[in-house]
Amino acid sequence: MHVLLTNDDGVDSPGLLALAQALRALGEVSVLAPDHNWSASGHVKTLHRPLRAWSFTLADGSPAMTTDGAPSDCVALAVLGLIEKPIDLVISGINPHANVGHDVTYSGTVMAAMEAVINGVPGLAISLDSPGIPSSVEAYRGAADVARRLAERLQSHPLPAGVLLNVNVPNLPAEAYRGISLTRQGLRLYRDALVRREDPRGRPYFWIGGEAPTGILEKGTDLWALSQALVSITPLQLDLTSYPALEALHPLTR
């Protein structure tokens, strides 16, 4: 099994290193990740400038590659031939914060897995529900083991075409996980606020600030699963069509 690893936090992220160390037990691991943080970058494809890629050495001395492109660029570069050996699975992460509800549309982590599926390769995004940004590899060991076990099971139970897995892991010791739950996307409640400031020359600039988002803990959702100390696995599909709306909107065509 040949697994490509990437992320949106940068090639030197401890979550990526934990993932690489865990996945080596299954076979060959290639790493191609951004040279800097691309959090909340969404689905990016760089078309109007050249992309550069070069070798990198992870903290444990193992080889990797990095690029000045986005997470989705990393996957595109790899499957288009920058990594010559065919890729069986793309895993993106481990993100230091949960990607739940509408977060997935902003998440570079999830969109890297989506780019894999667009290119016909199974994709899995994995995130840790941490309130901060853990700096140690050890903090990600439990989530990395979840990714390894899922990758192993996907060999005998492949994903349907056009589907990727969004996995969120409780910020707990592995022995405290209460199990694994298949979930649907929950509802995030964003509390954004516009912050206006001025630079030293009196020109205005803006931050999108506000309090951290919350969510509705409805049973069966990704948010609910994490609140119950469950690993959440949400299958996401590339087809965003609202099929019920197709019927409801027929009057618009008459």
Image (cartoon, helix red, strand yellow):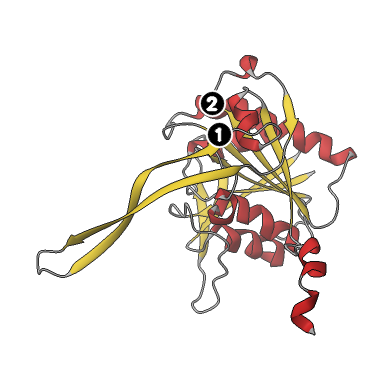
User: 251 above or below 147?
Assistant: below
User: In this image, 97 relative to 115: left or right?
Assistant: left
Between 41 and 13, the residue placed more toward the observer is 41
Return the residue at label 2: 171
Residue 204 appears in which quarter of the rendering? bottom left
Q: Earlier in the sequence, mark 2 or mark 1?
A: 1
CA gap, disc 2 to disc 1?
6 Å
What secondary structure is found at the residue carrying circle 2? loop
Where is residue 117? Give x, y as percent.
74, 58
Residue 26 shows in this picture: no
Seen as rendered, the residue at the extreme bottom is 254
Q: Does the rendering let one see residue 215?
A: yes
The one of 35 and 102 positioned closer to us in this rendering:
102
Q: Residue at x 60, y 35 (%)?
A: 223
Q: Residue at x 49, y 31 (%)?
A: 130
Please indicate whether residue 235 sits to the left or right of residue 12 in the image: right
Quadrant where the C terminus is found in the figure:
bottom right
How many circles with numbers are drawn on the protein? Answer: 2
Kind of residue at badge 1: Leu
Query: Quarter of the image holding residue 194?
Result: bottom left
Q: Label 1, on which residue?
A: 128
Q: Secondary structure at mark 1?
A: strand
Q: Are marks 2 and 1 in contact (CB under 8 Å)?
A: yes
